[in-house]
Image (cartoon, rainbow, N blue to C red):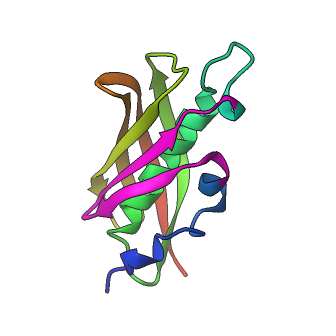
Amino acid sequence: MPKNISDMHKGFHPFGELIGLEFAAIGDGRSRCELEVKEGLFNPHGVLHGGAIYAMADTGMGGALYTVLDENELCTTVEIKIAYFKAVKSGKLVCETRVIERHSRIAILESEVTAGDKLVAKALGTFYIYET
């Protein structure tokens, strides 16, 4: 029996809330999360810290994978490779994620982070699936 997606509400992910990350859509092995760029997330060069972008991809991947897990399953990040293409100083970032492949214990996911029509980063992740 699949997990209840209604569990993906405010309070589900305290770190995401800390940085202002919100899920806009989630279901069927996909997720869309958004982050408003703010100075508190800048690096010393006055642009959005890469860790905030990485957090979007990681959280988006967990959310997308969550939608295809059984009730007795959880997941954890094994590794994520991310490439950054554009520095961001303002606006809203959108992270679109999809499950590429899911096996019994391993899943592969892909995220694209955009600002408007500009590709900011792309990530490929591997997650481990385990029973509770």
Q: The N terminus is located in which quarter?
A: bottom left
Residue lying farthest to the right in this orientation: 44
Is residue 37 within the magenta segment?
A: yes
Viewer-proximal residue among 121 and 65: 121
Q: Is residue 71 above or below residue 67?
A: below
Instruction: Tally the marks.
Output: 0
**Residue lying at 75% horizontally and 17% vertically, measured from the top left:** 44
Please state if 5 lies on the left or on the right of 56 as rendered. Answer: left
What stretch of residues is rendered in magenta?
18-39
Viewer-proximal residue among 115 and 124: 115
Image quadrant assignment for residue 70? bottom left
| Residue 90 x/y as whole percent | 52, 25
Q: The C terminus is located in which quarter?
A: bottom right
| Residue 92 x/y as whole percent | 45, 35
Viewer-proximal residue among 31 and 58: 31
Is residue 122 within the magenta segment?
A: no
**Residue lying at 33% horizontally and 58% vertically, measured from the top left:** 25
Viewer-proximal residue among 132 and 40: 40
Residue lying farthest to the bottom in this orientation: 1
**Residue lying at 60% horizontally and 69% vertically, measured from the top left:** 11
**Residue lying at 44% horizontally and 45% vertically, measured from the top left:** 34
Q: Is residue 102 above or below residue 111?
A: below
Residue lying farthest to the top in this orientation: 45
Image quadrant assignment for residue 123? top left
Q: Is residue 104 above or below residue 45?
A: below
| Residue 102 x/y as whole percent | 31, 59
Please state if 113 lies on the left or on the right of 52 as rendered. Answer: left
Q: Is residue 88 above or below residue 108?
A: above
| Residue 81 x/y as whole percent | 48, 33
